[in-house]
Amino acid sequence: MQIHISKNHEELSDFTAQYLVDFIKNKPNATLVLTSGDTPKLAYQKMAVLGKDLDFSQVTFIGLDEWIGIPPESEGSCRYIVEENLLKPLQIPSQNYTFFDGLSDNLASECTRIDQLIFEKGGLDLIIVGIGLNGHIGLNEPHSSFENYCHVSDLEEITISVGQKYFTQATPLTQGITVGLKHLLEAQIAILLASGSKKADIIKRTITEEISEVLPSTVFQKHHNALLFLDEEAAIYTK
């Protein structure tokens, strides 16, 4: 596990954006899974500027997860955050990216669809994820199996509570659909992105506690090429 520490969120976003742009330059047919949320938003905005002249025609982007029952145009959806801050500014054609449909009446089929796409691409070249205060990765909540590919999960109360910050009004959240930890373990590169003092304790636990499905983020200790991109506040207990 390699740890890169940036001074603050701004510099972390600069570093992450440059890393992703350079990665695609070196592998123009890459298959990437992208997280959403507040932490990567600025990195995506910076990547949209850095990558404005880059050829993305062979790149495949896949959304990490989605809230069940939330439409894609909702400001709190995974799709909305990634599209508005990265894909639309770069004018990435819709055939080059896909997200889970949280409104589907056949969620098992949605899981199969994303699984098959990843398998057809020969696995993931890179997956970038955030981390929840309970150690969830994507919407792989505590006790999620490391052997799961894409699946539906029941959300813990803390995830439901924190998730409200993405919406302008109280929004019922009960389940999520997510790329599973088995896909993460099989990815060529797995990046964990974290910023701010609120994430410091869970980052410490992630790198020091015994590997366990009780704390999904410890899966990074098992990965052959795991990278932690942190700012100083999130990394305070790693030094």
Image: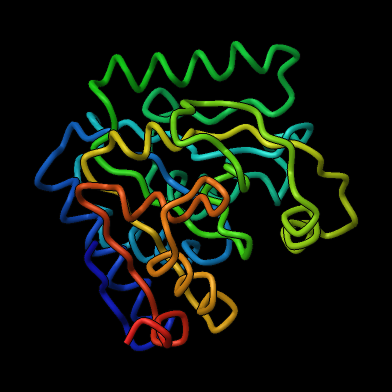
Position of 115 with respect to 155 (left or right) is: left
Residues 115 and 74: in front is 115
Residues 23 and 95: in front is 23
Question: Residue at 20% across / 51% down in the picture?
Answer: 225
Q: Quadrant of residue 218?
A: bottom left
Residues 21 and 133: in front is 133
* Position of the N terminus by quadrant: bottom left
Q: Residue furthest left?
A: 26
Where residue 58 sits: x, y (%)? Answer: 22, 29
Classify 65 as above or below 209. Answer: above
> What is the basis of the colouring in this image?
rainbow
Q: How many marks?
A: 0
Classify 135 as above or below 186. Answer: below
Q: Quadrant of residue 30?
A: top left
Where residue 223 sits: x, y (%)? Answer: 27, 47
Question: Residue at 80% across / 60% down in the picture?
Answer: 161
Question: Residue at 69% across / 29% down in the picture?
Answer: 102
Residues 144 and 175: in front is 144
Where residue 189 sits: x, y (%)? Answer: 24, 47
Classify 225 as above or below 121. Answer: below
Position of 169 with respect to 118 (left or right) is: right
Where residue 159 sits: x, y (%)? Answer: 72, 55
Q: Quadrant of residue 183?
A: top left
Classify 37 as above or below 55. Answer: below
* Position of the C terminus by quadrant: bottom left
Position of 183 with respect to 85 (left or right) is: left
